[in-house]
Image: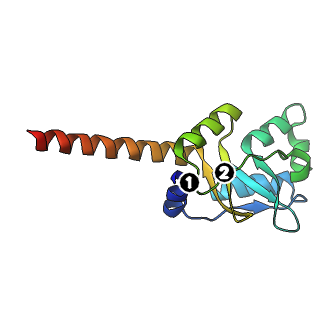
Amino acid sequence: MAVAHILRQKGTSVVTVEPSDSVQTIVDILARHRIGAVVVVDGAGGIAGIVSERDVVRAMAGHAAAVLDKTAKDIMTVKVLTCGPADSEAELMQLMTEHRIRHLPVIANGRVAGMISIGDVVKLRIESMEAEAHHMKSYIASAG
């Protein structure tokens, strides 16, 4: 339920690139959209990989500017972990923490249906805690 809730609030837009797009293009897209990762899609619209800011930085180690001419295919993470609309906040936190990742594409009906970031999960957690505190205060006040 948490994933579906997040997507209702933030929308289902996902920024994608193709495997042949240059790292320079990807960096420009990340900066322009103020995001931390893009999904790399194959010719059929499926997920071929993901490129995050971390992928770019790791590729730059020892190669610096030469990386900008490489392609998404050269630096992308191929094993992409995903989540579904029914996944819970706890499942998201466990997956992101265990695998040290910050972005999870959402898959629904075999297609990319959104992107969840660690910031989205933190925001949801804060909202949940605030709602719980409000309910507790109301309960205590009514028990008076």
Type of amino acid at the residue the image marks with label 2: Cys
The residue at 70%/61% (across/down) is 15
Mark 1 element type = helix
Sooner in the amino-acid sequence: mark 1 or mark 2: 1
Q: Identify which residue is drawn at 75% across, 61% down.
A: 16
Image coords of residue 65 (percent x, y)? 87, 42
Q: Amino acid at mark 1?
A: Val
Given residues 98 and 76, the one toward you in this image is: 98
Query: Which residue does the numbered mark 2 point to in the structure image?
Result: 83
| Label disc, if present, on residue 3 of the rendered structure | 1
- Distance (Cα) linking label 1 and label 2: 8 Å
Please state the horizontal and vertical placement of residue 115, each as a whole percent of the image. Answer: 64, 55
Q: Position of residue 121 (x, y in %)?
A: 53, 45
Does residue 71 appear left or right of residue 116 in this picture?
Answer: right
Residue 5 vs residue 61, the one in the foreground: 5
Q: Is residue 129 visible?
A: yes
Tags 1 and 2 touching, CB below 8 Å: yes
* Residue drawn at the location 78% of the way across and 48% of the way down: 51
**Residue 51: image tag:** none
In percent of the image, x 11 and y 40: which residue is there?
Answer: 143
